[in-house]
Amino acid sequence: MATTAQLFEEPFDADEYIERLAWRTPGGGSKGGAEAFDPKRLLEEFENHIEELKQLDERIQRRVEKLEHQCHREAKEFAHKVQDLQRSNQVAFQHFQELDEHISYVATKVCHLGDQLEGVNTPRQRAVEAQRLMTYFNEFLDGDLRSDVFNNPDKIKEAADIIQKLHLIAQELPFDRFADVKAKIASKYHDLERQLIQEFTAAQRRGEIGRMREVAAVLLHFKGYAHCVDVYIKQCQEAHVKEKLDGTRHSDVEQYLKNLYDLYTRTTALATKLTEFNLGSDKHTFLSKLIKSIFSSYLESYIDMEREYLRTRGAMILQRYYDSKNHQKRPVGTGSIQELKERIRQRTNLTLGPSIDTHGETFLSPELVVNLLQETRHAFERCHRLSDPSDLPKNAFSIFLLLVEHLCVDHIDYALEIGLSAIPSADAKNANLYFLDVVQQANSIFHLFDKQFNDQLMPLISSSPKLAECLHKKKEVIEQMEVKLDTGIDRTLNCMVGQMKHILATEQKKTDFRPEDENNVMIQYTTACSKVCAYVSRQVEHVRKSMDGKNVDTVLTELGVRFHRLIHEHLQQYSYSSMGGMLAICDVAEYRRCAKDFRVPLVLQLFDTLHALCNLLVVAPDNLKQVCSGEQLTNLDRNLLHAFVQLRVDYRSARLGRHFS
């Protein structure tokens, strides 16, 4: 993977980058994926990336030095230009001082003249203004507003100026004589105030900044000016939110959800900071209502869009993975017939339907799982922030169901179905038993699923009735997976035993235990025994790599018991001479040494007992009863002991049966 500077553009997550590098490296990851974990290979990959980073750093440093040199050169040129401009500025400043002196002289003369004119004009203007106000006051007194200024909407600014002055005058009049006219003036005052606020709101929506400035200047002298400020703030918030969200609501749902989460989070954080100020006794309710009025239309449809996005995104991630494998998903049957087949398969281990060859492909992808879990993690975070507290458990559960559908059903369960279909029959030769690889990866993936369940879902539903429903669904998913895992492991073990049986049938000769020349037997154990032990050792190691925890001992115990049963039944198919019995004892000793690799006491005990039974093939006839009474054989069924004695070639000639009478 080439390392470039674009890797460090925002947002950059170092942990995610390292994790992806580890998953993609063959032999990397927590257990190495389909390959064995190879720390040297992973270390080598990291060292190569570190070397690339060093080279990138050197290239960037050379570029920085080049830019610094260029900057110094341009700084010098700029300094020269500044010096020239300073000299020009000094000349201009001298001219400006001379001009300023002339202007000051003229201004002094003009101010003196203005003062003289104002002294004459001001009394006249006051008289005219008083006469005008008295005219308008008479109209209110008569109850007939005839002037065009009160009836023409285009003159609302002039009307507001007049009514504001009349309102102040009316406050000084005695109430008993002028109650009616005062009420009329107050009514007109509030009516114009309301019209101005409406005009301000409309101008803001149209984006007419100049008109907003004019109306705000008129409203400045009214008591309702504070409402103008409130309207402005609310409109600004709604315009910003609408611009950010409406543009992506239908075209890019992912970006819409990110923007909604970001805007709502920042708004609630701002509200938290605002509570530190003195906004009144009910400031929390006020801020909550304000936020709700802005985001209510978006929050109402949030969870539906979240579910739809997750459903579409999850399906796309899955389809992209299977397309990369050139794999056409097989339909998994449902209904009563499929359930009947499943029961028959579980009880009989029969393969119902054609077996497929997957060429060792598990159809489980760590990278796909990381992508699905990451999308779900973001969804849980958004759900926590954007859901109403009463709807939070229900919404979180719906997201969890989608994760179960995509990860557990469409991916893990599908891979298990494919894996089960690919398990060969028990009598197949040289079968590729890759189902254990499916088990390993399925367990690793489910651990990640379980971690997200505990870390991100549980805090959202822990105190709600949905907790029991979530736990039940999780248990149901686990049980369904365990049934298929158990079925696949059981059939895989049958294949292993079938392979051992094939090796024994092919390699074991009847003459192995009845050699023609009793005195020239040089081998320590038979070829069949050697090949079976080598095969079993490989399978034991395979099981250890594929399982974890108590599952290792459980599977190895079952394999060991079947291994012992096979050898026990196999040995009873032959008759043994004295030297042949010794060879059988050597074979069983080798089988017992192989059984130690299981590290299961029961399996080792079974082979210890089998080894003791094989002693009956070579012991002197007179010592049979003593051997059968030994510590390892005394509790065994007499018929079993007798059956082994009957395998001796000298059974009838030496009349060994009388020792069991």
Image (spheres, rainbow, N blue to C red):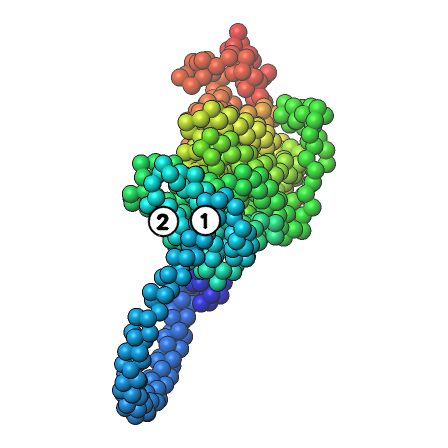
Q: Are marks 2 and 1 in contact (CB under 8 Å)?
A: no
Residue type (three-letter) at the residue carrying disc 2? Ile
Residue 411 image position (x, y, % from top left): 59, 40
- State which tag comes first along the sequence, 2 or 1: 1
> x, y percentage for residue 346?
62, 25
Residue 501 image-quadrant placement: top right
86 over 254 or under it: above or below: below
In the picture provided, is 516 more to the left or to the right than 550? right
Residue depicted at x 41% and y 16%: 630
Q: Mark 2 sits on what residue?
A: 169
**Residue 661 visible in the picture:** yes
**Residue 133 location, quadrant:** bottom left
Q: Residue at x 31, y 36 (%)?
A: 281
544 on left or right of 248: left
Rendering coords of residue 387 (x, y %): 48, 37
Q: Who is closer to the viewer here, 412 or 244?
A: 244
Residue bearing the label numbered 1: 138
> Given the image, on which type of amino acid does mark 1 rest?
Asn
Q: Is residue 591 visible?
A: no
Above or below residue 232? Residue 71 is below
Query: Picture coordinates of residue 497 (x, y %)?
Result: 59, 32
Q: Nearer the viewer, residue 256 or 128?
A: 128
**Residue at point 33%, 84% (across, down):** 75
Q: Nearer the viewer, mark 2 or mark 1?
A: 1
Q: What is the spatial separation of the Cα atoms under label 2 and label 1, in whole angstroms?
A: 13 Å
Q: Which mark is residue 481?
A: none
Q: Seen from this angle, which residue lies furthest top? A: 661
Front in this rendered view, residue 425 or 148: 148
